[in-house]
Image (cartoon, rainbow, N blue to C red):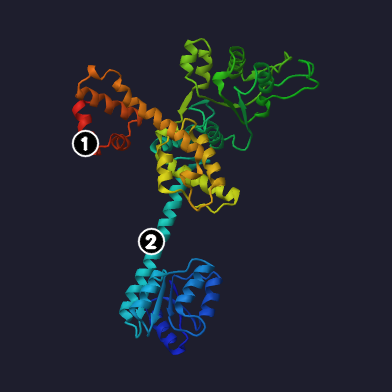
Amino acid sequence: MKTILAVDDQKNSLKVLAAILEDEGYRVIQATSARQALEIHADGTRIEAVLSDFKMPGMNGLELFKQMNSQRKAPPFIIMSAYGTVKSAVQALKEGVTHYLIKPLDYDELSIVLAKAIREREMARELDTLKEQVRDEEVFHGIIGGTRQMLDIFEIVRTAGPTDVPVLIRGETGTGKELLARALHLESERRDSEMVCINSAALADNLLEAELFGYIKGAFTGAVSDRKGRLEAANHGTLFLDEIGQMSLRLQSKLLRFLEEMTFEPVGSTAARRVDVRVLAATNLNLPVEIEKGRFLRDLLYRIDVINIELPPLRERREDIYLLVDHYIRRYAARFGKDIQGVEPATMQALVDHQWPGNIRELKNYLARGVILSKKKKLSLADLPDFNASSAKTADTLDEAPTGLSSQPGNLTLREMEKKMIRATLAACDGNKSRTAARLGISRKTLYEKIARYKL
């Protein structure tokens, strides 16, 4: 049963209104003053709509609506007035009132208006619920992505996560490889145990060996006591080897032996130790190429690459930039105590068009700096001075590609020059036809015609 709050200082009118609404199946809460209505609204009672007289002592209906909104968002609000004018009705609707009815009431009209207002509110709630569901789907263990590529990756993680097979995560720097490894860990049966991370590129060879396998007292100068390595720390959990392509061949060989036997020897020891660990690895290198160059063991690749996941660079999933910008601006605004509610349209377009060589890590850096520096409610390009310089440099580089055609113009026909210009601009814009057309100063329709003509 829907609950209606009816507000009128005329008690007889209020009783009649309540009786009619109850006959239509509504539950009616009566208030004989705006102050009483405010108290009912403030106590959290679920109210589907408010019917309020306009002219009341102390506080009129429009003022009541404003006060309710200052407490928390008011339900659909319908004002009733015997003193209605076009001007007062327009003013009420501008303030956000749902509807304005003239007394004496046409109860058939009231019934229609009330049912419509309640239904629209229910639809708004349903839409909010759907938005939350979409947002949940787009955020997977802290990874933000709504593109088909990312949703497919999330599905692979859900499928491979519960197994114990090794997974190799490939992707450029800053794409979120460690976050993806953590998602795999959280989807596994090992989620209640530790996930231990080690960056193979961050430590010298001997230090990396000691960190990974541990050591015993006296193994080397400074080893004054036994110390467990990351492998033992990850027992019954997950070990994440970041930048595994940077590991020396000697350590790769030792790691390969561990993966084959699940036993290892700490530095300085000959006693084998056994652990139960799932190994996840990541790299920004092309490991088959590294194998050909003699820098990576083929057998090790076979061991770590049972499941392969490739994270796309940000420039290949530009639609996700909108989600990422919204997420991180809200996060940084809360962290730094700033009242920033988004970005200006031109700024968003510039962020979407940027090449992002540093991927999400680079985007987060710019947004954090911009939120700190901004003095407005919306982030502008002026808040991102370093980004502007970087974008200008990128644009200059892109602009140079087509103009390189002029080195020997006498050797090219106009048709050949146009074909080369379009091909170069398409490449510079990563195949994005809208940006290509804009850069060339032609319509998308014209661009498509020329692509078909030149078979590009």
Q: Percent x, y for residue 235?
A: 65, 28
Residue at 33%, 81% in the rendered image: 107
Gap between marks 2 and 1, in whole Å?
42 Å
Please tell me how many numbered marks the rendered image carries: 2
| Side of 445 relative to 27 (left or right) | left
Q: Percent x, y for residue 16?
A: 40, 86
Q: Residue furthest right?
A: 224
Inspect the image, locate mark 1, and give the three-letter code of the amino acid beneath it: Thr
Residue 312, visible in the rendered structure: no
Quadrant in which the C terminus is drawn: top left
Q: Nearer the viewer, residue 409 or 75?
A: 409
| Side of 368 relative to 101 (left or right) | right
- What SS does tag 2 mark? helix
- 239 vs 99: above or below: above
Badge 2 vs badge 1, beta-carbon distance below 8 Å: no
Q: Percent x, y for residue 168?
A: 50, 25
Q: Percent x, y for residue 8?
A: 46, 83
- 252 vs 13: above or below: above
Mark 2 or 1, nearer chain start: 2
Residue at 71%, 18% in the rendered image: 266
Mark 1 highlights which residue? 446
Mark 2 highlights which residue? 123
Q: Nearer the viewer, mark 2 or mark 1?
A: 1
- What SS does tag 1 mark? helix
Q: Nearer the viewer, residue 418 or 20?
A: 418
